[in-house]
Amino acid sequence: MKFRQIEAFRAVILLGTTSAAATELHISQPAVSRLINDLEDSLNFRLFHRRKGRLHPTTDAADFFAAVEESFLGFEKLQSVAEQIRQKVPTQLRISCTPSIGSSLLPMAIQEHKKYYPNERFTLLTDNVTQSITKLQCGSVDLAVGLELPQLIGIKTQSIGLARYVFVARKDHPLATKKSITAQDLIGESVLTVVDEKSSYWEKISDSLACVKDQIKQDIMIDTSHTGYAMIAAGIAVGVVEPFAARLWRNNDIITREFLPAITYSYGLAFPVGSREHPSLQAFCQSVRQVAATMDEFNQ
């Protein structure tokens, strides 16, 4: 397996055709095809189906591409650092966060931080737990904000607080008349199921529904809460989900109710320690904790 072959594979996946990849790599189209064929031979599995002169990625190609992208993160970081050195670009704070935290806590925290660091530049990346861990460990982000991460070598964590998960439904749903919801109330309902590479994170929810598992429908799988809220707003399902996204969905005919017994998750900050630390990182972490302390979601 050679780097040029990997480059060709990545270009075809990202650009969609061998001709576009050839233009991007400044080589001929047959050369791209030859590199792909050589890569497949070295891997001993097919990356593309050939149909009517076009390449269509296989499922194996999708898995392989995910690993390739992680490898390119380090290379792209070197390119970014070199560009900053050349142009003397001001430093930026790179943050990995869950979609719901990125649309609730972080805007207020950045607003607070900019009172003292008005020229700070931010890059916000929405990720799941696995992606946040990977980006922290390879140094492509300075901070992760979201569900509290496990102990990792070279990574320090700080707690933001506990968030109590809520039952969510359309406001015209029969259960909207109740003050609190239990698992027994969900019998016969279509209930959202969270799917994630770190499935152990969601055991609290699955355990709370275990007593009615055979009496509820779990036909809608989601990997982000905003998608879940959209499904609920459409009347397709109900769910027990994080409370932060509700801020943006309250005007879309949804209601939240307490779920009993209470399900709480720890949220926190995670960042690399030592020489890799961003110069204004601690000040921003303080802004995050300060804003979180004022949010109802962390004070239930």
Image (cartoon, grey):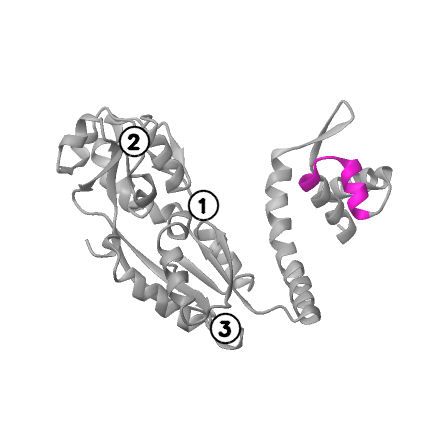
In terms of image quadrants, where is residue 227?
A: top left
The answer to whether residue 27 shows anywhere in this view is yes
Q: CA distance from mark 2 to mark 3?
A: 42 Å
**Residue 205 to residue 298: above or below:** above
Q: CA distance from mark 1 to mark 3?
A: 28 Å
> Any mark on residue 197, and which?
1
Q: Residue at x 36, y 31 (%)?
A: 231
**Could you say where residue 82 lies in the image, as x and y percent from the top left?**
69, 67
Decide which of 22, 281 is in the foreground and name it: 281
Q: Indicate the secondary structure of the residue bearing disc 2.
A: loop
Q: Which residue is mark 3?
A: 277
Whichever of labels 1 and 2 marks the residue nearer the N terminus, that label is 2
Q: CA distance from mark 1 to mark 2?
A: 20 Å
Q: Which residue is mark 2?
A: 191
- Amino acid beneath label 1: Glu
> Any mark on residue 225, and which?
none
Whichever of labels 2 and 3 marks the residue nearer the N terminus, that label is 2
Q: Is residue 24 magenta?
A: yes
- Amino acid beneath label 2: Val
Decide which of 42, 92 is in the foreground and name it: 92
